[in-house]
Image (cartoon, rainbow, N blue to C red):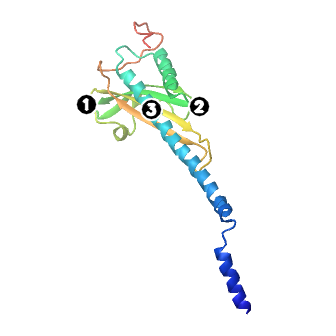
Amino acid sequence: MLIQRFKTLLRRLRKDMHGAVVVESMIALPLLFWVTMASFEFYEVHRYKAVREKATYTVADMISREGCQITRNYLDKTFVLYNDMLRDRGANQIRFTVVEYDGSNDKYEVKWSFLRGDGDLESLPSGELANGDEILPALSSGQQIILVETFSTYKPYFRVGMGNSIDMETRIFISPRFVPKVDYKSALEAGDCEDAV
């Protein structure tokens, strides 16, 4: 008798739907909220990276078309332009480097390298580039290549498992277009193209 009553009670409990929506909502809403925030963050991190790649390519292309010598003023204004293209809250850093391949000694040499912005990048010293053949494309002897590298740190808006920050690095190689070599001229030297930018 007691067992029969217990079975009847279980059957009624199984068919009873009161409170099911509340329980399902309590389970589903936090998950739905997290998925929405994670989707936003994943989109934002890819947008952040894509904007930096486009801006870096634009800056590299601009330098590759320069017929005059590059100056400190030119690099300063280029960094301002780079930041204006990004239009975001990130702290950015950019390194401009010109590398030349010496075919007789089979080595890559840094002709000049300058840094703008605050971050973890350091300007490359003049001389032979260590591991140049691993990161640089094959060049003919005496050929120069412009290397523009950028570094930024993305800080997520929401905590969805991406950590506190994500480092974004971009590296663009481009050859000089209208001149065989891109030279740097110090501010002390006189020149016709000082205010080219």
Residue 162 appears in the picture as rendered: no
Relative image position of residue 52 (x, y in whole percent): 47, 33
Do the residues bearing badges 1 and 2 touch, measured as CB atoms within 8 Å?
A: no
Residue that carries the numbered disc 1 in the rendered image: 140
* Quadrant of the rendering where the N terminus is positioned: bottom right
Q: CA distance from mark 2 to mark 3?
A: 19 Å
- Is residue 174 or residue 33 the one in the foreground? 33
Q: Quadrant of the C terminus?
A: top left
Whether residue 134 is visible here, answered yes or no, is yes
Between circles 1 and 2, the one closer to the viewer is 2
Residue 89 shows which numbered tag? 2
Q: Residue at x 56, y 39 (%)?
A: 154
110 sits left or right of 83 in the view? left
Residue occupying image coordinates x 35% and y 22%: 64
Amino acid type, label 2? Arg
Residue 163 as seen in the image, left or right of residue 12: left
Residue that extends furthest to the bottom in the rendered view of this protein: 1
Q: Quadrant of residue 189?
A: top left
Disc ID at residue 149: 3
Does 78 sit left or right of 136 as displayed? right
106 up-or-down from 40: above or below: above
Amino acid residing under circle 3: Glu
| Circle count | 3
